[in-house]
Image: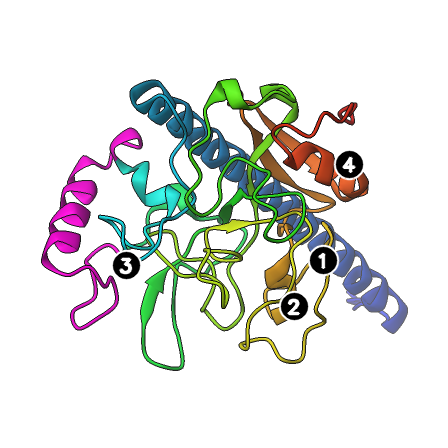
Amino acid sequence: MRRHGFTLIEFLVVTGIIAVLLALTLAGVQRVRMVAARTVCADNTRQLALGLQNYHSTHGRFPPGIRGAKDRYPFMAWSARLLPYLEQSAAWAEAVEDYKRQPSFTSPVPHRNLARPLPVFLCPADGRKVGTTEEGTTAAFTFYLGVSASFSQQRDGVLFRDSDVRLADVTDGTSHTLILGERPPSADAYFGWWYAGIGQDQLDGSADSVMAVRELNRTFRAPTCPHGPYHFGPGSPDDPCDTFHFWSLHPRGAHFAFADGSVRFLRYDADPILPALATRAGGEAVALPD
């Protein structure tokens, strides 16, 4: 009995079909991963927004974005002050102990929380959890920054250096005022620490734990980047210039939380209205995108 093998054309057709099926499978897996990562980031944003609400319920005001060298906790980020409201009481106790022992959070002995990654501050779309600077400082990252202002150094938002904002101060409406948004840490690991950080050259935490929606490049660490102002738009983990604007690794936009605790995914085409949404008492009339 004569046995027939595959002809070259048949082999190429079968190979092509297998390649297409593999491509479709991989694309489907990638889409599932992207959706899962976006869901986790939305949940993290909600947890942080709830933590801010609970902090306000306890203290009668939102936490400061950061405070300066004369504070009991110099340059501690707002996110670290939320630890008791994020089921991280043990980490908060360590922070209090470490600041009492040594006000400088990086030297001579770094605070224990500085290099400790916490899931609520991370985004699974980006595998980075900690980074080490050229000087050898290792710090754990956050992907969520407080909205400090409409324009760099204006302090007309909710979370900024020495902020002391109450819900009653948000006269633009808490459902129309941004309080935090997504932005991955910088490529060089200098910006985006959840525990503490001085920010840019003015020591106001900018681009580190808080940021304006029209931020400027005010640091010597990014000499090749334009001065700005920067706008809400797509970015890349490898581009140092994307340190200075809100963005995410999710397609077409990023998650933001509002002062009332709600969370929305804003598309990049919402950039023109972000300055109005960033002010707590600007008197602007803004319609949120669908």
Q: Position of residue 25 (x, y in %)?
A: 67, 49
Q: Amino acid at mark 1?
A: Tyr
- Quote the CA–CA distance across marks 3 and 4: 35 Å
- Residue farthest to the right? 9
Dot 4 or dot 2: first in sequence order is 2
Of the two numbered discs 1 and 3 in the rendering, the one whose residue sits closer to the viewer: 1
Dot 1 or dot 2: first in sequence order is 1
Determine contact: label 1, label 3, CB under 8 Å.
no
Closest to the observer, 124 or 102: 102
Dot 4 or dot 1: first in sequence order is 1
Q: Position of residue 8 (x, y in %)?
A: 86, 73
Assign a secondary structure to mark 3: loop
Image: magenta residue range: 84-113
Assign a secondary structure to mark 4: helix
Of the two numbered discs 4 and 2 in the rendering, the one whose residue sits closer to the viewer: 4
Name the residue tied to disc 3. 114
Q: Amino acid at mark 2?
A: Cys
- Tell me the crowding category of disc 3: few under 14, some 14 to 19, or many 20 or more residues within 10 angstroms, Cα based: many
Name the residue tied to disc 2. 241
